[in-house]
Amino acid sequence: MTASRARRIAVRRSAVHGRGVFALRDIPADARIIQYRGDVLTWELAQIRYEEPADCVEGHTFFFDRGDGTVIDGGSNGNSARYINHGCDPNCEAFEHAGRVYIYAAREILAGTELLLDYQLQLDDPRDPELRRPYGCSCGAVSCRSTMLAP
Ligand SMILES: [Zn+2]
């Protein structure tokens, strides 16, 4: 561990949703913050795994959509990256590298700020209001589009 890899994020209660991940120190733009770990599943399997509606609401925030029909289930073998909340004006971005997903700072993140990621979730039928309902967003950003789903 080098000094630059000292702990710079922590999981705390969030005003946005449940728990969130916060910067403990200033994080420069473009810094790689953490790998998003967890089981890789197809959306179908993920939905079966979290069939119960209550679990689904709790569980979907732990899914990282890889955009290819698979998700990373941070709720299983995951790390604290699963607590990064959705925000419509995110300060983090995720990039895939050699099959792994890493969270990067999209801009400088000051100590004490909550890390937010635009989930941009994809649904099989994004116009179905029943399917859309659990993915509502109230992040408070001026640009909030009221959903965690992809525009
Ligand atoms: Zn929002």
Image (spheres, rainbow, N blue to C red):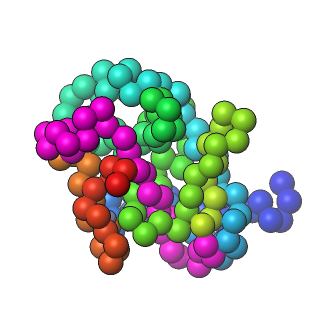
**Residue shown at 44% from the left, 57% from the top:** 118
Q: Is residue 49 visible?
A: no
**Left or right of residue 35, residue 12 in this image:** left
Q: Give the position of the C terminus as an image quadrant.
A: bottom left
- Between 150 and 88, the residue placed more toward the observer is 150
Q: Is residue 103 magenta?
A: no
Which segment did they paint magenta? 107-132
Q: Quadrant of residue 126?
A: top left
Q: Is residue 113 magenta?
A: yes
**Residue shown at 59% from the left, 78% from the top:** 110
Q: Is residue 142 visible?
A: yes
Position in image of residue 39 (x %, y %) = 53, 28
Position in image of residue 125 (x %, y %) = 25, 35
Position in image of residue 143 (x %, y %) = 34, 73
**Residue shown at 23% from the left, 54% from the top:** 136
**Left or right of residue 113, residue 148 in this image:** left
Position in image of residue 95 (x %, y %) = 62, 49
